[in-house]
Amino acid sequence: MWTKVCHISQLPQGSATVFRSADHNIGIFHTEQGLFAMHNICPHVHTELHNGDLNHGMVYCPRHSWSFGLKDGVCTLHSRYNLATFPVKEEDQHIWVEPDQGQSV
């Protein structure tokens, strides 16, 4: 089920936010390439990735700079650390995520 995260004006290009529920902690990232959503917790030290730097389609963990592809959740260090990604879209000037449709690589 699609869930409204925020108004598009609250997430300017180059920024990130988080969607939290009882079952999910999903980072929502707005880049030049579009919107992306992925599991928000770095598997290394359990830091929230939405607080990390965005660069060239990657998010970098703010604690130890591990990097993950926004499109596919792939960790550049080792595939065992890949993260799930989620469907995300902009509709009616709001950002929506489908938290129960996560995809792992």
Image: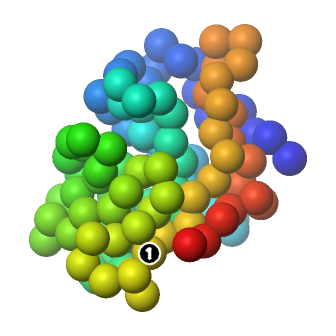
Count of numbered circles on the image: 1
Considering every residue shown, the one lying at the far bottom of the view is 80
Establish if 42 lies above or below 1.
Answer: below
**Residue 27's x, y, as percent?**
47, 50
Q: Residue furthest right?
A: 1
Q: Position of residue 94 (x, y in %)?
A: 64, 20
Q: Is residue 21 visible?
A: no
In the image, taking residue 101 as reference, residue 24 lies left or right, namely left
- Asked whether, in this view, residue 62 is left or right of residue 36, the answer is left
Q: Residue 5 or 80: which is nearer the viewer?
A: 80
Q: Residue at x 48, y 13 (%)?
A: 9
- x, y (%) of residue 92? 72, 12
Q: What amino acid is found at the position of numbered circle 1 in the picture?
A: Asn
Which residue does the image show at 49% across and 58% down from the upper left? 72
Q: How is the image coloured?
A: rainbow
Is the C terminus in the top left, top right, bottom left or bottom right quadrant?
bottom right
Left or right of 67 on screen, residue 105: right
Report the residue at 50% width, 42% height from top.
36
Residue 64 relative to residue 69: left or right = left
- Provide the secondary structure element on which disc 1 rests: loop
Closer to the camera in the image, 74 or 65: 74
Res 88 visible: yes
Residue 46: give x, y in percent of width and height.
Answer: 34, 76
Residue 49: quadrant of the picture? bottom left
The residue lying furthest to the left in this view is 64
Residue that badge 1 annotates: 82
Circle 1: is it few (<14), some (14-19), or many (20+) Cα within 10 Å?
many
| Residue 53 higher or lower than 76, as above or below | above
Question: For the point 71% across and 19% down, which residue is it?
Answer: 91
Quadrant of residue 85 within the rendered picture = bottom right
